[in-house]
Image (spheres, grey):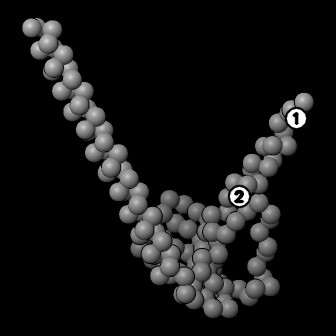
Amino acid sequence: MVNGVLLSSSLKSFIQLLGVLVIFLFVLLITYVVTRWIAGYQKGHMAGQNLQLIETMRIANNKFVQIIQAGEIYLVIAVGKDDVCLLAKLTAEQLLELPSGQTGSSGTPDFQDILDKLKEHLPKKKD
């Protein structure tokens, strides 16, 4: 009798644990789907605009220098916590090409380039 009661309470606890785990996974899934949907909506909403961020560089905490394209004009701006200042206007000829392996606004190397470089340094398999 005592063994049956322990098994019953252990089984109930295990079922409750599984229930909580299923609910947690469901909430994670819903969060993921909604986040992807909102990101796609915002990207599609902003796709036809005339402004494009070309490059960003952090110069201090909460302070950035950015190059943005407005139509055919390139603007260099300083972005602070509460203000934005125009630093210069550039033409397309004045912009330097990004070195290969760097992309747009983040200025960080492309993941595929990093992976290719890593593959070069790994020893080859001998068949």
Tell me, yes or no, if residue 92 can be seen here.
yes
Quadrant that contains the N terminus = top left
**Of labels 2 and 1, the one closer to you:** 1
Q: Please identify the quadrant where the C terminus is shown.
A: top right
The structure residue drawn at horizontal position 44% and vertical position 75%, both measured from the top left corner, is 41
Is 34 in front, or is 11?
11
Quarter of the image holding residue 68? bottom right
Q: Amino acid at mark 1?
A: Lys
58 and 25: which one is in front? 25
Q: Earlier in the sequence, mark 2 or mark 1?
A: 2
> Residue farthest to the right?
126
Q: Which element is circle 1 on?
A: loop
Q: What's the CA distance linking mark 2 and mark 1?
A: 24 Å
Q: Amino acid at mark 2?
A: Asp
> How would you rate the neighbour count of disc 2 (Cα within 10 Å): few for under 14, some for 14-19, many for 20 or more?
some
- On screen, residue 97 above or below 26: below
Judging from the image, what secondary structure is the residue with disc 2 in?
A: loop
Q: Which residue is mark 1?
A: 124
User: Which residue occupies 11% across, 14% down?
Assistant: 5
Instruction: From the viewer's side, name the closer residue of 29 and 116.
Output: 29
Closer-to-camera residue (18/113): 18
Residue 118 found in image quarter? top right
- Side of 105 relative to 42 (left or right): right
**Position above or below: 92 against 4:** below
- Residue 44 percent coordinates (x, y): 50, 79
Q: Say the numbered circle drawn on residue 110.
A: 2
